[in-house]
Amino acid sequence: MKQLNIGLVGYGFMGRTHSNAFLQAPRFFDLPYVPVLKAVAARNEERVKKFAENWGYESHTSDWRDLVNRKDVDLIDIASPNDTHHEIAIAAARAGKMVMCEKPLGRNAIEAKAMTESIEQAGVPNTVWYNYRRVPAVTMIKELLDEGRFGRIFHYRAKFLQDWTISKDLPQGGEGLWRLDVSVAGSGVTGDLLAHNIDTALWLNGPIVEVTAMTETFIKERTHNLTGKVEPVGIDDASAFLARFENGSLATFEATRYARGHKALYTLEINGEHASAFWDLHDLHRIQYFDHRDEGRVRGWRNVHVTDGDQPYMKHWWVPGLQIGYEHTFTHQFADFVEAAARGRALPPTFRDGLATDRVTDAVLKSAKSRQWEKVEC
Ligand SMILES: NC(=O)c1ccc[n+]([C@@H]2O[C@H](COP(=O)([O-])OP(=O)(O)OC[C@H]3O[C@@H](n4cnc5c(N)ncnc54)[C@H](O)[C@@H]3O)[C@@H](O)[C@H]2O)c1
């Protein structure tokens, strides 16, 4: 069978989830290519070597350009901070490589547009790692919507709450903490957390046409890890917005890293004429589902445990009733990507889908400044 030679950029949090997916996918899915962990690139020579040994990469380098220049690498996987996505993706596309890129696609829609044009011109398979689409319960909500069970949609509601940046002593910059440095991240929770909520929302409920937003930076200065100096904080610590979808439904979105007690509380709810569904990342294998067309006497919220073989992705795993978790969402996306790539296709969310999300986050940030409703570029 033909090999798919992978060059990974970044060995942090996402470097690990992706590497795990590359190893797991061929054991649980019948893939058309054999994934080969060819090389990994990250800046720290000693640590990248250790990472390569731990995960079984054949080679390592401290410069991502080495991966793009290698003839024996088919796929560049970008798992490095947001400020690196644009340059690496465009170079990889020009070299004719397939590209999987972490979210958000660019630090803003200008970067994302250039990346999308470049990848489409190259005509290579691509995807953006909005992995929550491939939580089986979330995929099942999409299936129920596509079957028309909800009727006309009135409301969409999403939030993503964390609490890890409340301390004023937390520095900005460097591994993990680059998220607090606006020059690297592009924005705060809007591009980091809300981007996930927005991608799922666009997938489930169609385009967003306009937004009105508010953001706040609660801690205005933090020591920078790279300079050692106290520097202004340019990211949004909290962001909330109202939105109108093209289908006429209304939405509320909220994200913060200052909701004490909440670690990764991504929730979404959709309310239609006939049915409603609710999902919560802390209980990711369940959906709450209500169908008004059920017989009145027994009508109520169903708590559906999404673990059976006829529910999305689950036939690839264990026996009914046994759960899978967060890491499997990456395995699902990689398996789907390999299937699409074998047919020469991009896998949704494609770069164009990633651009659509960046256009919404740009409009959110613009509205927070203008204090006006802002149209989303299409
Ligand atoms: N899909 C998700 O749920 C999800 C979750 C977390 C992070 N992310 C995204 O993944 C990306 C990486 O985030 P993370 O949490 O893994 O960050 P991290 O800080 O844990 O790791 C970043 C890695 O990139 C490397 N790196 C930095 N600059 C580089 C460069 N110029 N060349 C090569 N390597 C470089 C670092 O050495 C490190 O290995 C970000 O875009 C982030 O938004 C997505």
Image (tube, helix red, strand yellow):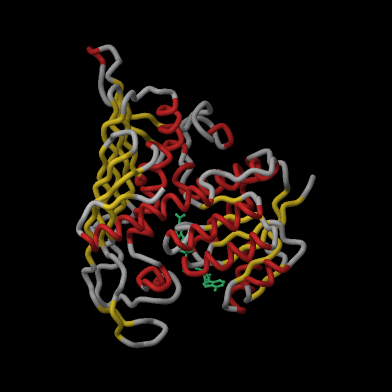
Residue 180, picture quadrant = bottom left
Marks counted in the figure total 0
Q: In this view, does 367 lie to the left or right of 361?
A: left
Seen in the picture, residue 151 relative to 92 is either above or below; the reply is above
Q: Residue furthest right?
A: 1
Residue under the point 54% across and 48% down? 350
Spot occupied by residue 136 in the image (x, y as percentages of width and height): 47, 37
Q: In which quarter of the image is residue 115?
A: bottom right
Viewed as shown, does residue 344 lie left or right of 269?
A: right
Q: Position of residue 49 (x, y in %)?
A: 64, 73
Viewer-side residue, 319 vs 291: 291
Front one among 263 and 344: 344
> In the image, is residue 370 above or below residue 127?
below
Image coordinates of residue 207 in percent, x first then y, are: 38, 41
Can you give x and y, in whole percent of width and height, for residue 241 in the image? 25, 51
Q: Quadrant of the N terminus?
A: top right
Is residue 45 shown above or below 301?
below
Residue shown at the point (51%, 33%) measured from the top left: 312
Q: Can residue 27 be seen in this view?
A: no
Which of these two is toward me, 39 or 297? 39
Q: Does residue 181 appear left or right of residue 121 in this picture? A: left
Q: Which residue is drawn at 38% across and 51% down?
A: 377
Is residue 265 shown to the viewer in this render?
yes
